Amino acid sequence: MLKRLAGLLRNTQLSLFEPEAAAPPVQPRTPDTVRPQGQRRLLLSGHPVDYELRRARRRSIGFVVSADGLRVSAPRWVTIAEIEQALQGKQDWILRKLVEQRERARRLDAAKVVWADGASLPYLGAPLQLRLGGLARYDAQARQLHLGLPPDSGAQRMREATQAWLCAQARALFEQRCRHFATALGVRYTKLSLSSAQTRWGSASVSGAIRLNWRLIHFSPAVIDYVVAHELAHLREMNHSPRFWAVVGSVLPGYEEARQRLRDEPVPQLGD
């Protein structure tokens, strides 16, 4: 049995999937809680961890930690005891990823926008307050966006007006930064368009077309510059080789910090 378990552990597949929305994966339950079919629990380093077990036609045990918690896929012939021994063998990795998911869920929850007068969301890396009533205008000094909507406007009207304004600001700024970095890199882009992709910040095609996610407008100018320079650098190197990163660094020294901030900072959840 130990020999067979060792073979399973050598072939264990670990993966991490991080969608946009998340919920805390580890939630203590009372002992008499009835768990859905396929849900099991074991102790890892003294912590109760729930996991979903799926039987599949495969040769090894696979672990996936996602927003929904821990999922285990195992061949039909592997016993529960062997599966849980494999989990114990990878408990440090599992617990670390569960904590990361819980922290991500906390940050995403904090990033949700409550659509009401006085709501706040990030614009160019700093809080922007939304106000109802009065004429539509942007007060840069007070960092307030007056939407020009009646005080009793609902969430949908507020969201639509806010997004329209943010997209307009994004297009104007992205055009300016694309011209700047295209000149610096000695490349020519043919078209700039905005995207609303959930998992991609930008793209570049061999035809010179650049697509940038309008949600970048939430980030600081340094982060926006990183994404713009990144995509335009692809017009010289259509890859992510060391040569590509050297091109990015030639016009944006120290881009690594902005790259990390893009990964770490949560994007506001507008509900669109």
Image (cartoon, helix red, strand yellow):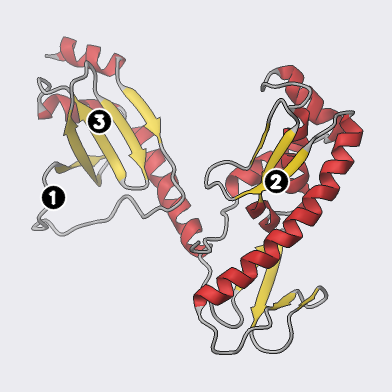
Quarter of the image for residue 122 reads: bottom right
- Residue 260: x and y in percent read 65, 41
Q: Residues within 10 Å of mark 1 (few under 14, many from 20)?
A: few
> SS of the residue at dot 2?
strand
> SS of the residue at dot 3?
helix
- Residue 253: x and y in percent read 83, 34
The kind of residue on which mark 2 rests is Ser
Please tell me whether residue 66 is drawn above or below residue 150 in the rendered image. Answer: above
In the rendered view, does 148 fall on the left or right side of 233?
Answer: left
Q: Are marks 2 and 1 in contact (CB under 8 Å)?
A: no
The kind of residue on which mark 1 rests is Pro
Which sits in the foreground, 169 or 101? 169
Q: Residues within 10 Å of mark 2 (few under 14, many from 20)?
A: some
The tag on residue 87 is 3
Going 77% across and 26% down the picture, which residue do you hit? 235
> SS of the residue at dot 1?
loop
Going 35% across and 38% down the picture, which residue do you hit? 65
Q: Are marks 2 and 3 in contact (CB under 8 Å)?
A: no
Quarter of the image for residue 255 reads: top right
The kind of residue on which mark 3 rests is Leu
The tag on residue 36 is 1
In the rendered view, does 132 fall on the left or right side of 27?
Answer: right
Residue under circle 2?
Answer: 193
Q: Residues within 10 Å of mark 3 (few under 14, many from 20)?
A: many
